[in-house]
């Protein structure tokens, strides 16, 4: 047996009867069957649908564990401490907490990344793309059936200054392999007209953001299209359900650019329901720093997520020095 594609410190080398390897990290173990993922920890067990689990860990690892908390569902998820990550069960679930069934372990971010990458590589079948909408991918289920390395190793766009600027991320076109999505055939593709003053031709850059987004081949995967100090514009195209429930450690602004998304908003720590927010094209919302949210998009829509990446923000909110919402009513 070769050791090239095995990670003995993370999981079994021999597949189970469905063809999938088991994995473990610390006192957590992960296994999958034809429909479900089974997570076990010292005082509990949990089941998640295999497609939903793969969509969630795909986002978590691709986003470097994101801002704050990434709940895969109401039980399992990660907390980002920016260098280390907690893997938890039941920690943000009032009932698990009351019953004393919650459990959490801290790992170096690298270790969890390697675990999730190894799980994705082994458990994603050839027919399934965790970044795609359900209508644009095949089944995640059944016995092990090949792999989909191209889909799970995609890198998202992260501009250094702005997409389309000299030396930065190129603008997407049919020619570089990004056709217009089936739900965005009505989006105008014309390039903006720019008339810079003589001498400033190389400093004025513009792109048609709607045309750019109409060619996104993934869902619920924000790109960073512009960077101004810690202000990041992260637009994305959304269809079906956000694969994670995001518990933020800062305020996050949403600008609904097209169509409609409904958001379920809950208390970040207990999961108690707080609001249902329907955002239509043109609506703007500030998601507070003490909630968690999950979006539902009935047709592919365009959403601008505006992030403040300042590293000092989590401590300011956690200590109460900053109120959890930009406006106090
Ligand atoms: C969020 O959690 O705020 C979020 C994540 C991914 C998206 C959109 C919003 O595509
Ligand atoms: Fe969020």
Image (cartoon, grey):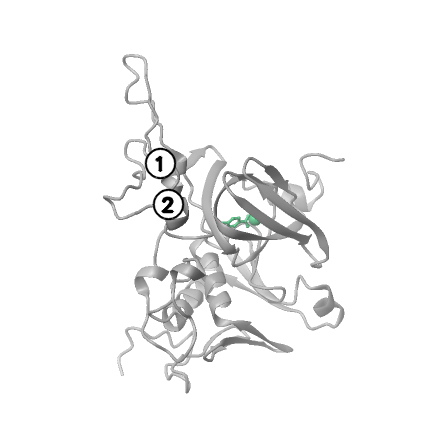
At 28% from the left and 73% from the top, the residue drawn is 4
State the residue at coordinates (40%, 42%).
213
Disc 2 crowd rating (10 Å Cα; few below 14, some 14-19, many 20+) is some
Point out residue 35 in the picture as x, y percentages from the top left corner. Answer: 48, 77
What residue sits right under mark 1 in the picture? 163
How far across and down, in percent of the image, does residue 223 sit? 42, 44
Q: Could one spot residue 83 in this view of the protein?
A: no
Residue 200 to residue 241: above or below: above
Residue at disc 2, secondary structure = loop
Please identify the residue farthest to the left as the structure is shown: 175
**Which quarter of the picture shows residue 93?**
bottom right
Mark 1 CB near ligand 1 (8 Å cut): no
Q: Going 42% across and 60% down the picture, which residue do you hit?
A: 135
Q: Residue at x 41, y 70 (%)?
A: 139
Toward the bottom, the furthest residue is 17
Figure quadrant of residue 125: bottom left
Q: Dividing the picture into quarters, in which one does residue 226 lie?
A: top left
Which type of secondary structure does the marked residue at label 1 adopt? Answer: loop
Q: In this view, does 297 lie above or below 165?
A: below
Identify the residue position indicated by label 2 in the image.
157
Q: Distance between the residues labelled 2 and 1?
A: 9 Å
Image side of residue 291 versus residue 138, left or right:
right
Viewer-side residue, 122 vs 113:
122
Percent coordinates x, y for residue 198 in the rendering: 28, 12
Q: Quick one: 100 or 293, which is closer to the camera? A: 293
Where residue 48 appears, as percent x and y from the top left, is 55, 71
Q: Can residue 5 be seen in this view?
A: yes
- Of the image marks 2 and 1, the number of the one nearer the N terminus: 2
Asked whether the residues under the numbered discs 2 and 1 touch, taking CB atoms below 8 Å apart as contact, a structural biologist would say yes
Quarter of the picture containing the C terminus is top right
Q: In which quarter of the image is the N terminus?
A: bottom left
């Amino acid at each position: 047996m070769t050791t090239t594609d095995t990670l003995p410190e993370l999981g079994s080398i021999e597949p189970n009867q469905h063809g999938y390897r088991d994995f473990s990290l610390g006192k957590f173990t992960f296994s999958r069957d034809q429909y479900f993922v089974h997570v076990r920890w010292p005082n509990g067990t949990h089941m998640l649908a295999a497609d939903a689990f793969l969509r969630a860990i795909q986002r978590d690892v691709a986003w470097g564990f994101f801002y704050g908390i990434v709940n895969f569902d109401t039980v399992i998820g990660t907390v980002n401490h920016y260098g280390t990550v907690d893997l938890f069960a039941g920690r943000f679930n009032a009932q698990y907490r009351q019953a004393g069934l919650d459990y959490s372990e801290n790992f170096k971010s690298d270790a969890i990344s390697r675990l999730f990458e190894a799980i994705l590589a082994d458990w994603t079948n050839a027919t399934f793309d965790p970044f795609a909408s359900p209508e644009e991918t095949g089944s995640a289920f059944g016995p092990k059936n090949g792999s989909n390395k191209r889909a799970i190793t995609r890198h998202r766009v992260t501009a250094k200054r702005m997409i389309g600027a000299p030396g930065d991320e190129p603008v997407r076109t049919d020619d570089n392999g990004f056709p217009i999505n089936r739900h965005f055939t009505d989006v105008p593709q014309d390039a903006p007209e720019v008339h810079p003053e003589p001498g400033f031709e190389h400093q004025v850059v513009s792109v048609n953001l709607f045309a750019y987004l109409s060619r996104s081949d993934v869902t619920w995967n924000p790109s960073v299209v512009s960077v101004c100090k810690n202000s990041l514009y992260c637009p994305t195209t959304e269809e079906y359900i956000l694969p994670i429930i995001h518990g933020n450690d800062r305020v996050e602004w949403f600008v609904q650019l097209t169509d409609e998304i409904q958001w379920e908003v809950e208390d970040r720590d207990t999961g108690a329901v707080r609001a249902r927010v329907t955002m239509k094209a043109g609506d703007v919302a500030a998601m507070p720093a003490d909630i968690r949210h999950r979006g539902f998009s009935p047709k592919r829509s365009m959403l601008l997520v505006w992030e403040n990446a300042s590293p000092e923000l989590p401590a300011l909110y956690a200590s109460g020095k900053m109120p959890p919402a930009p406006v106090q009513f």
